[in-house]
Image: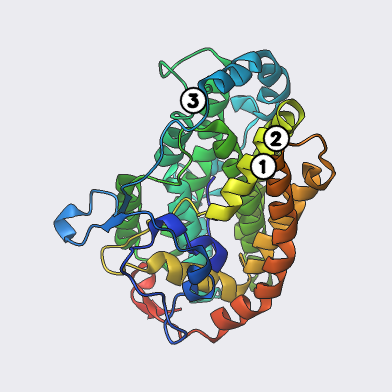
Amino acid sequence: MATSIVTDSFLSSKSLRLHPRAAPSTPGLRSPRFFVASAVRSAATTVEIQSPNERFKPYRINLNEKTHSMPPQKVEIFKSLEDWAEDNILVYLKPVEKCWQPQDFLPDATTEGFYEQAREIKERAKEIPDDYFVVLVGDMITEEALPNYQTFLNVLDGVKDETGSSPTSWANWIRGWTAEENRHGDLLNKYLYLSGRVDMRQIEKSIQYLIGSGMGAGMENNPYLGFMYTSFQERATFVTHGSTARLAKPYGDHNLTQICGTIASDEKRHEVAYTKIVEKLFEIDPDGTVQAFAYMMKKKIVMPAWQLYDGRDDKIFDHYATVAQRIGAYTARDYGDILEFLLGRWKVEGLTGLSSEGRKSQEYVCELLPRMRNLEERIISKAKQAPKIPFSWIFDREA
């Protein structure tokens, strides 16, 4: 999942995470959050951990976080889908022996040519601008927080791995997906180390802070919400890694282009699996599924790394997201494109036989896209006009 990931103001405006007394950002500040914060502010009570000694705890804690919101009878839906998942979802995992591994893209330290190959990576990296490296680092840190994402999946009612090595189809998917995703952070981490362009200790601290903070994406142990989230996120990470592949190409770093493109291909395959799960839920329970879709979109899809922290900058996630907007790695337009893709993929507009609440939800998600499109250019423009700031990840150079 991860990488992802970079975000836009739609994503960084996580309504359940804003401090109730915090004033919204102003146009003069770096963060793009002010564009939509007033529209999504929640009455939920939150606490922000301020002491550096408390940083092993989540930076923002939602005291009103719901748990186990799915009605118990709906757990049986997922139990009944075990055989379906084995035949239709596990096929999107590749056998380990057929998977690429990070070493396929990196110098081999056992060969005499290792030092020369490592020097070549460093030389090519000199041509790539700092703002690109900020985005690549943010993507890598997000990927490295994979323990959080496996934990998130393993608390979803009806699909969680009850024993840690359960033979169920859902548990096999969670472990297999995690194992494939684990290669992404490994590969990007090693490339960035060899590039010589980034402060690895600051990056490693950021990874530790992020994993220690957890995820807290507000899924309520509910697989309807969880699979909506992963469908959106895997599409977003596919877009993001595809963008970093495209952006590396003009600088002549074809190895980096291949690295990012290969990761994007994995994310695409995982996206297909998750969207297929939700498609099946629309088939079995269209009313409950469309209501879950609307619920998630009202809350906004918060990126997995929204609690990112480097030990210095409390708003580094927003700052990183702004750089991603500016260079075109992941933008408000991409967020709208993903929503448009999912609406079409799941044929939401054509759903029939819904309850009154289901019809309201259908209407909400179908009417949301035009409203988002109206904000896109303004959000992207503001990000481009935002002043550059120093990032610890690149030795306090500005991006």
Viewer-nearest of labels 3 and 1? 1
Left or right of 191? Residue 376 is right
For the residue marked with disc 3, what is the amino acid? Answer: Asp
For the residue marked with disc 2, what is the amino acid? Answer: Asp
Q: Quadrant of the N terminus?
A: top right
Kind of element beneath mark 3: loop
- Dividing the picture into quarters, in which one does residue 372 lie? bottom right
Mark sitting on residue 157: 3
Q: Please name the residue shown 80% across and 34% down the image.
A: 353
- Between the C-alphas of marks 2 and 3, the distance is 19 Å
Pointer 2: residues within 10 angstroms few (<14), some, or many (20+)? Answer: many
- Cβ–Cβ under 8 Å for marks 1 and 2: yes
For the residue marked with disc 1, what is the amino acid? Answer: Glu
- Between the C-alphas of marks 1 and 2, the distance is 8 Å
Q: Please name the residue shown 67% across and 78% down the image.
A: 377
Mark sitting on residue 287: 2
